Image (cartoon, helix red, strand yellow):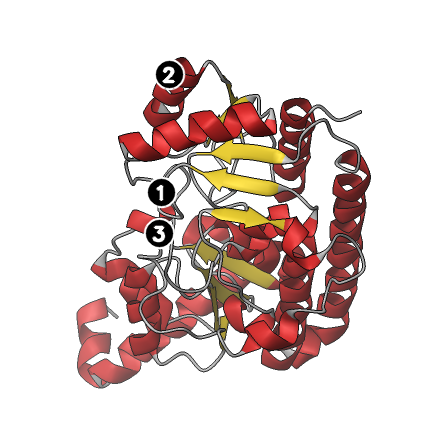
């Protein structure tokens, strides 16, 4: 019997239904889920940018199919979403993002109506960091959590949290502190267990493994930066406030928390003075943003340039294949710049 005759006998909706069924059956049996766009029964996870993607992949393991809204090499702060990406957010089972980094993403997620939506900023305590952040404010060791209480009420400051140059709201760069990132990892683990209870045991195991790895990274930083000739480092992107605070360092940001802001001549003069006084040797620039500012500044001040990667994305220019490896490269760069003994 020809297809046409079959069509006449069966209502068209049933045909459509049969076709859909056929497709799902196919995708479930196919050897490569990715190839035909189906993910079998994996949890569809949307991550806003690399630090969230890394957590979702490490903790979700084989049970998740993770899509990042920020493609490698794109400066996450400037991200504009396509209608297709906005549609894909709504179709997710689970969305992981960090409010305050990407205004376009924050808006799209708010409108997506996905039940399992997790804002990483709520899983640890955010703090306000200006362009100069010092670990000395809170004493060195031991008072890891001493100041969390007073900061907790600032967690959700107004504004989109990104136009925060020197003043401004809470600093969103929590992933650059391995201790805070581990707190976020635990929260992500717990929320994945709730979203997909069938695989809770695996999520728990993966979370514990990642938290242990981040603990080792924290120890490497603690020991590696304990004895240094100077505690001050200069950077074009003030993303390292939490890291500075964690390890008793002082970050001197040339242009506040927005990586694209141009520094004023007065600020450049100030950096020159600070560098002399604090015996800073290096101006750090990052992999994704322009290094023009850092190079000009280094020339004007006689400082070296180096790379400190804020880990907002991984590309083939990154000094490492993933978060842990790039953080190890950052540690080596800091040790060199600070004169680790």
Disc 1/disc 2 C-alpha distance (Å):
27 Å
Horizontal and vertical percent position of residue 70: 38, 49
Secondary structure beneath label 2: helix
* In the depicted structure, whether residue 220 falls above or below residue 207: above
Residue at figure coordinates x 17%, y 71% from the top left: 4
Q: Tags 3 and 1 in contact by the CB under 8 Å rule?
A: no
Horizontal and vertical percent position of residue 65: 53, 59
How many numbered callouts?
3
Q: Nearer the viewer, mark 3 or mark 1?
A: 3
Residue wearing tag 2: 300
Disc 3/disc 1 C-alpha distance (Å):
17 Å
Judge the density around disc 3: few (<14), some (14-19), many (≥20) Cα neighbours within 10 Å: many
Q: Tags 1 and 2 in contact by the CB under 8 Å rule?
A: no
* In the depicted structure, whether residue 3 falls above or below residue 340: below
* In the depicted structure, whether residue 281 falls above or below residue 133: above
Q: Which mark is residue 165?
A: 3
- Reading the chain from its start, which is encountered first: label 1 or label 2? 1
- Reading the chain from its start, which is encountered first: label 3 or label 2? 3
Q: Locate residue 301 relative to residue 1 in the image: left or right.
A: right
Between residue 279 and residue 109, name the one nearer to us: 279
């Amino acid at each position: 019997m020809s297809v046409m005759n079959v069509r006449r006998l069966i209502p068209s909706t049933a045909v459509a239904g049969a076709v859909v069924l056929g497709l799902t059956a196919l995708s479930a049996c196919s050897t490569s889920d990715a190839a035909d766009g189906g993910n079998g029964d994996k949890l569809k996870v949307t991550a806003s940018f690399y630090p969230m993607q890394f957590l979702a992949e490490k903790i979700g393991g084989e049970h998740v199919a993770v899509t990042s809204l920020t493609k490698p090499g794109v400066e996450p702060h400037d991200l504009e979403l396509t209608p297709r990406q906005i549609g894909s957010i709504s179709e997710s089972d689970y969305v992981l993002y960090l409010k305050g980094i990407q205004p376009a993403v924050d808006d799209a997620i708010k409108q997506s109506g996905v039940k399992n939506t997790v804002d990483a900023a709520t899983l640890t305590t955010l703090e306000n960091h200006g362009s100069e952040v010092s670990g000395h404010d809170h004493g060195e060791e031991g008072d890891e959590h001493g100041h969390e209480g007073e900061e907790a009420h600032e967690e959700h400051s107004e504004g989109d949290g990104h136009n925060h140059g020197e003043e401004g709201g809470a600093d969103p760069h929590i992933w650059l502190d391995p201790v805070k990132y581990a707190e976020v990892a635990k929260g992500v683990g717990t929320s994945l267990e709730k979203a997909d209870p069938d695989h809770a045991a695996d999520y728990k195991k993966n979370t514990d493994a990642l938290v242990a790895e981040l603990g080792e990274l924290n120890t490497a930083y603690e020991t590696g930066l304990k004895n240094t000739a100077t505690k001050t480092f200069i950077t074009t992107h003030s993303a390292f406030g939490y890291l500075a605070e964690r390890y008793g360092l002082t970050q001197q940001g040339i242009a506040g928390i927005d990586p694209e802001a141009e520094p004023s001549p007065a600020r450049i003069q100030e950096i020159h003075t600070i560098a002399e006084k604090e015996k800073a040797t290096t101006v750090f620039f990052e992999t994704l943003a322009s290094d023009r500012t850092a190079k000009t500044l280094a020339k004007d001040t006689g400082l070296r340039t180096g790379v400190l990667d804020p880990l907002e994305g991984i590309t083939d220019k990154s000094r490492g294949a993933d978060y842990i490896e790039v953080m190890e490269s950052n540690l080596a760069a800091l040790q060199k710049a600070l004169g680790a003994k």
